[in-house]
Image: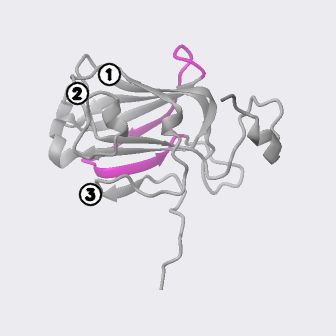
Amino acid sequence: MSTPNLLPPDDGTPIIHQGSRKPPVLPWPDISSRAKWSVSSFKFGFGAECLLDGDPETFWHSDGPQPHFITIEFPRKVAIQKLSIHLNFPQDDSYTPSTLAIRAGTGQNDLQDVRVVTLDKPDGWITFDISSEPNAEADGFNPVYAYVLQIIVAANHMSGKDTHVRGLRVLGPLEDTTCLEEEFPFYSPQFKMYETLR
């Protein structure tokens, strides 16, 4: 007998997959591959590609002055619902982020703070909403519409200087939310077939 596919609670509480090394299976669509990823600094062999490779043994290792940050740039405005991040305090110790500041905007010069997340010795994947603004039904949170998303490591555990992040996923909303700036938000199959250039 199979268990029903229940959605996790969407009350803003982070979903913690304690000790999980593999990316969790979540209902929200992973939109990470649609973007260009860059980091503020990295040690050779430990760059932005380690955030997306799905290997819990690799990690982004910053190598520069604080604050450290990850910048995710989409070619068009997208709806962003959640972030899923893999951290490992037992292994990374003072390299583990303790405070993350999330910024979003249309470009590098107009980024606005949308959320601050505090973490206590995290071990595994943690998934949380980007926004803290309740939706109209008051049963979850609104997505953030942005071209650019930036995750800033504002502080590390034990006042560490460099940082390790073992994985990161950007998740869209459950429903196919149209961009606020779309002039003609049609949904017909014919329109969908020709909406992007190949």
In this rendering, which labeled residue sits more in front, label 1 or label 2?
2
Relative to 55, 176 lies left or right: right
Which image quadrant: the C terminus? top right
Name the residue rendered at 51%, 30% in the picture.
35
- Residue 187 in view, yes or no: no
Q: Which residue is mark 3?
A: 19
The percent position of residue 125, horizontal first and vertical second, equals 35, 51
**What is the crowding at mark 3: few (fewer than 14 residues within 10 Å), some, or many (at least 20)?**
some
Question: On screen, 171 above or below 110?
Answer: below
The coloring applied to the image is: one colour
Q: Secondary structure at mark 3?
A: loop
Residue 91 locus on image (x, y percent): 16, 45
Query: Is 35 contained in the magenta span?
Result: no
Segment tinted magenta in the rendering: 106-130
Q: Which residue is the site of mark 2?
A: 45
Quarter location, residue 192: top right
Q: From the viewer's perspective, is 99 left or right of 163?
A: right
Q: Is residue 55 visible?
A: yes
Labelled disc at residue 67: 1
In the image shown, does 66 or 106 lie closer to the viewer?
106
